[in-house]
Image (cartoon, helix red, strand yellow):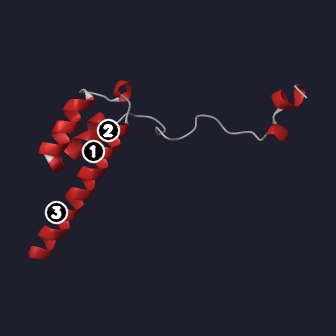
């Protein structure tokens, strides 16, 4: 019984830390539903529910914030670069 409580506490803490870092690094204009400060307060004071709510309703939708939009073309394959030579 105690083992399950410890595992649940560790998972909740990890989810809370992830949500706080993710929310604080997300641009204010990309956050949905509430302002950034409100999401941070919800995540801190209601850890499990707030973190899950952030992931479902607060995070920006899309391909991902850290991914690049286009394919990188090396200079030797880029016709624009080769045309400038």
Q: Given contact means CB atoms under 8 Å apart, are the residues at marks 1 and 3 in contact?
A: no
Q: Residue at x 49, y 38 (%)?
A: 63
Label 3 sits on a secondary structure element that is helix
Counting residues from the start of the chain, the first of labels 3 and 2 encountered is 3
Circle number at residue 20: 1
Counting residues from the start of the chain, the first of labels 1 and 3 encountered is 3
Q: Is residue 66 above or below residue 35?
A: below
Q: Given contact means CB atoms under 8 Å apart, are the residues at marks 3 and 2 in contact?
A: no
Dot 2, how many residues are within 10 Å of its Cα: few (below 14), some (14-19), or many (20+)? Answer: few
Circle number at residue 24: 2
Rendered location of residue 74, percent (x, y): 77, 41
Q: Residue at x 12, y 68 (%)?
A: 5
Rendered location of residue 85, percent (x, y): 91, 29
Q: Given contact means CB atoms under 8 Å apart, are the residues at marks 1 and 2 in contact?
A: yes
Tell me if 65 is positioned left or right of 6 in this view.
Answer: right
The residue that mark 3 highlights is: 9
Circle number at residue 82: none
Q: Residue at x 16, y 39 (%)?
A: 42
Rendered location of residue 34, percent (x, y): 23, 27
Marks 1, 3: nearer the viewer: 1
In the orientation shown, which residue stands out farthest toward the left? 1
Spatial CA span between label 1 and label 3: 16 Å
């Amino acid at each position: 019984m105690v083992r399950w409580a410890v595992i649940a506490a560790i998972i909740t803490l990890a989810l809370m830390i992830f949500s706080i870092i993710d929310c604080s690094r997300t641009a204010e204009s990309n956050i949905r539903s509430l302002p950034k400060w409100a999401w941070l307060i919800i995540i801190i004071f209601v850890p499990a529910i707030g973190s899950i709510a952030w992931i479902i309703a607060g995070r920006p939708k899309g391909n991902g914030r850290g991914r690049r939009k286009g394919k990188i073309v090396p200079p030797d394959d880029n016709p624009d670069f080769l045309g400038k030579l």
